[in-house]
Amino acid sequence: MRATKLGRLVLTVLGLVLLVTATASARGPDWSGLGAVAVSPDGKTVITGGQNCTLYVLDAASLKVTRRHWLGTRIGALAFNRDGSVIVIEDDKNVLHFLGAGDLKPVAAVKNTAYISACRSADLLAGARHRDWRGAKAVCILSLNDGSEKAKMDLPAGTQVNRVALSPDGKRLAVLTREIKDKQKPTEKPKPPAGLTGLAVNKFQMQHDGKQSKLLIYEAPLGKLLKTHDLWYTSGHQWTTLLFDGETAVVFNYFNLNAKIAADGTVELFRVGGLAYGRGVSPDAKAFLTGSLRDGKYVTVENLKTKGFRIKAIKGFPEYFAGFTFHTDGSAYGVTSCFRLVKITRDAKVEKVVPVY
């Protein structure tokens, strides 16, 4: 009886946490430990941070912490500029902090900007421009060196930003909007016809649930709108990642109901692994990583083939992957809810796991 009551209490608390985070506009770490990770352009330095408001700088060869920087706010995303001289930190207050990579001193700060996508080869980043807690109705393109604004674009009336993604060459920007409800149609899941199974059921339900989203394609860094796709597919705001190679957009999320969107707006649903607590995209947009409880998937975008990897369990509370970044050589780093950093080879093998403190 006590175990049952405890289980109900845990589920209730978790439900409240999910409700709060689902309505939040800022991006902090999704889980209780590290949440963001990035690798310097020369591959010699790894940076990470998350729940405890501290930026950690590690030597990539030894994975030893060489410096710590107290930011004073939770860290949700990290990026380097092209020559590795500047670090960009997105915090949970919709502020971007630009720090000198050498001395970790402030270079600039940009407020009301969140859910960034960085393109190091073009020294650009894009983000959702927030006005208040209710969501972002504009996107911006900034310099990755100092945060100076290159362009700002207001979204169509009635839409809000879900995620943004710059193409690997920095010449195109994809913007996925949050769901748009059609007041003339039902919003509950319709009953699928007999005989449908698997993703065909999800496709039918999403095509008839009275919700849609838009995929907007802009020229970067000018911000000129090039194309608009009206989609029957929608993805929850809080745990979504967008990948864009300049033609195809890929949406993958915590719930593992993912979509590949072709240049003509055609949508293909797919799944890889289980729930995706952590996600990351390669700089060339040819691969992405997802991770859940100890397990992860290395996914090739072209054919959606996957390779799996797993870390050994530690004692105590379950450990989840919370974020990933790719090295230029195709290897990767993952961070976990238990403040650990995981080195992953190009063949999706766990090479090394270290605690970060």
Image (tube, grey):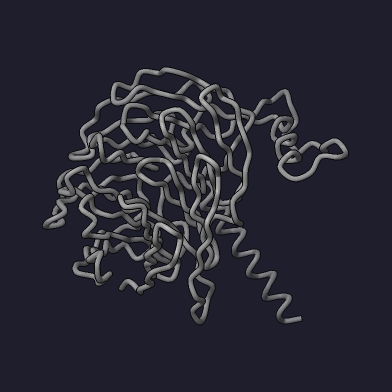
Question: Residue at the location (54% across, 55% down)?
Answer: 276
* Residue 273 horizontal/vertical position (percent): 60, 55
- Residue reaching furthest to the right: 194
Q: Is residue 91 visible?
A: no
Of 234 and 251, the residue lying toward us: 251
Asked if residue 302 is positioned above or below residue 158 in the image, the reply reads below
Question: Residue at the location (31% across, 57% down)?
Answer: 73
- Residue reaching furthest to the left: 103
* Residue 11 horizontal/vertical position (percent): 65, 65
Question: Residue at the location (11% across, 57% down)?
Answer: 103
- Which quarter of the picture shows residue 6? bottom right
Judged left or right of residue 72, residue 66 is: left
User: Quarter holding the C terminus?
Assistant: bottom left
- Which quarter of the picture shows residue 53? bottom left
Asked if residue 20 is positioned above or below residue 195 in the image, the reply reads below
Of 340 and 182, the residue lying toward us: 340
Give the number of marks. Answer: 0
User: Quarter holding the N terminus?
Assistant: bottom right
Judged left or right of residue 75, residue 315 is: right
* Residue 350 horizontal/vertical position (percent): 43, 67
Question: Residue at the location (21% across, 59% down)?
Answer: 44
Asked if residue 218 is positioned above or below residue 256 in the image, the reply reads above
Q: Is residue 97 visible?
A: yes
- Which quarter of the picture shows residue 293? bottom right
* Residue 286 horizontal/vertical position (percent): 43, 42
